[in-house]
Amino acid sequence: MASIFTKIINNEIPSHKVAENDEFLAFLDIQPLSEGHVLVVPKQEVDYIFDIEDELLGRMMQFAKSVARKMDKAFDCKRVGVSVVGIEVPHAHIHLIPINSVQDMNFSKEKLTYTQDELKAIAEKIKAS
């Protein structure tokens, strides 16, 4: 059965994409920890990030880096934090989160909510950077 991320990759579920190439997709998290929280996923469905073939994993990090650079420009943040949890969805993914302190990466805190129009504007802000 396809993961929710595979359904997003296949455009079966709408998302707010910020970057894409033949191997990877970056899109806004719908339950963000901060404005601009992005998920980076390989288009190849692999459950555990450390099961990804080495060269593909390297390219995934390079793709994530290019997205993070845009996020650095788009948001007033000290850093773009990186997290790989890998429990909530059986499809490897990297969280890129604009942060000003380590507390901004606390996944147990209350998530933010945005309208579809707000999410669209946030995605456009990243893409334009």
Image (spheres, rainbow, N blue to C red):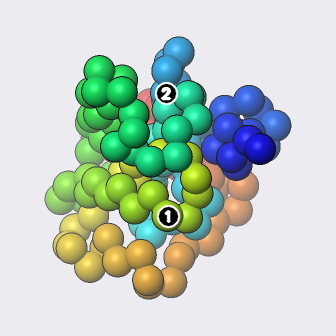
Q: Which mark is residue 31?
A: none
Quadrant in which residue 15 is drawn: top right
The residue identified by callout 2 is 24
- Give left or right: position of 38 versus 68: right
Q: Amino acid at mark 1?
A: Ile
- Number of the front mark, 2 or 1: 1
Describe residue 110's horizontal placement relative to residue 51 as left or right. right
Q: Say few, some or many: other residues with alpha carbon within 10 Å of mark 2 (under 14 / 14 to 19 / 20 or more).
A: some
Above or below for 70 versus 22: below
Q: Residue at x 76, y 32 (%)?
A: 11
Q: Secondary structure at mark 1?
A: loop
Placement of the C terminus among the 4 image quadrants: top left
Residue in the image at 49% along x and 27% along y: 24
Residue at 42%, 66% in the rendered image: 34
Q: How many marks?
A: 2
Residue 121 position in % (x across, y down): 59, 47
- Percent coordinates x, y for residue 103 in the rendering: 26, 79
Residue nearest the observer in this picture, 79 or 120 = 79
- Which mark is on residue 87? 1
Q: Is residue 6 left or right of residue 71?
A: right
The reply to whether residue 128 is visible in this rendering is yes
Residue 42 location in percent, x, y? 49, 32
Q: Residue furthest front?
A: 51
Cα separation between marks 2 and 1: 20 Å
Q: Is residue 124 above or below residue 100?
A: above
Q: Residue at x 28, y 27 (%)?
A: 54
In this rendering, the answer to whether 9 lies above or below 103 is above
**Number of residues whose C-alpha sits closer than 10 Å to that of mark 1, classed few (under 14), some (14–19) or many (20 or more):** few
